[in-house]
Amino acid sequence: MTNRSILHRSRVRDSAGKSYQSAWEREAMAQLRMLERAGRITGLEEQVTFALYIGTDGQAFVRSTRLRINAKREGVRIEAYRADAVYYEGETLVIVDAKNGFFSHEYKRKARWMDVLGYPVTEMNKRGTR
């Protein structure tokens, strides 16, 4: 058995057929959809990509064309971070990553640059958010 088959086997689906990387991620998204229906959050979107760019002026910035953040600003793309979900609490953009407890070095690096550039990542785990 290869590692690839283990990774593919862990994907789960919700009742609408949407695929998630873990049962916890599916549960976290269901909780967020319930909060949106209750009116506590707005604009919930899943799997939103944020790209780190270095601008022509030498300054780093984050771009997300889906959310229209720096959509027209020019620069060189360095890497990308895909959030499990984003939503608004009032006027505040909240970026969510649903984790089972393991934080890879890659995730830590990308979450750090999101935070430094003004877009902190909220981690949802089974014990709550942090």
Image (cartoon, rainbow, N blue to C red):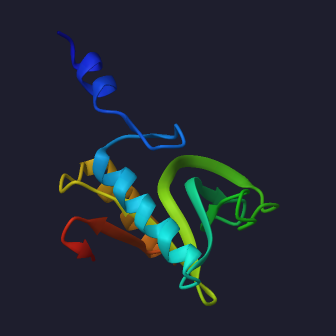
Residue 35, given in percent of the width and then of the height, sits at 49, 76
**In the rendered image of this protein, does residue 82 appear above or below residue 64?**
above
Give the quadrant of residue 12. Answer: top left
Left or right: 91 in relation to 56: left
Asked if residue 120 shows in the view, the reply is yes
**In the rendered image of this protein, does residue 42 appear above or below residue 59?**
below
Looking at the picture, tell me which residue is in the foreground, 98 or 40.
40
The residue at the far right in this view is: 72
Left or right: 98 in relation to 87: left
Residue 104, given in percent of the width and then of the height, sits at 24, 48
Left or right: 62 in relation to 116: right
Give the quadrant of residue 58. Answer: bottom right
Residue 60, given in percent of the width and then of the height, sits at 58, 65
Asked if residue 117 shows in the view, the reply is no
Identify which residue is drawn at 21% across, 12% down.
Answer: 2
The residue at the far top in this view is: 1
Identify which residue is drawn at 27% across, 17% down.
Answer: 5
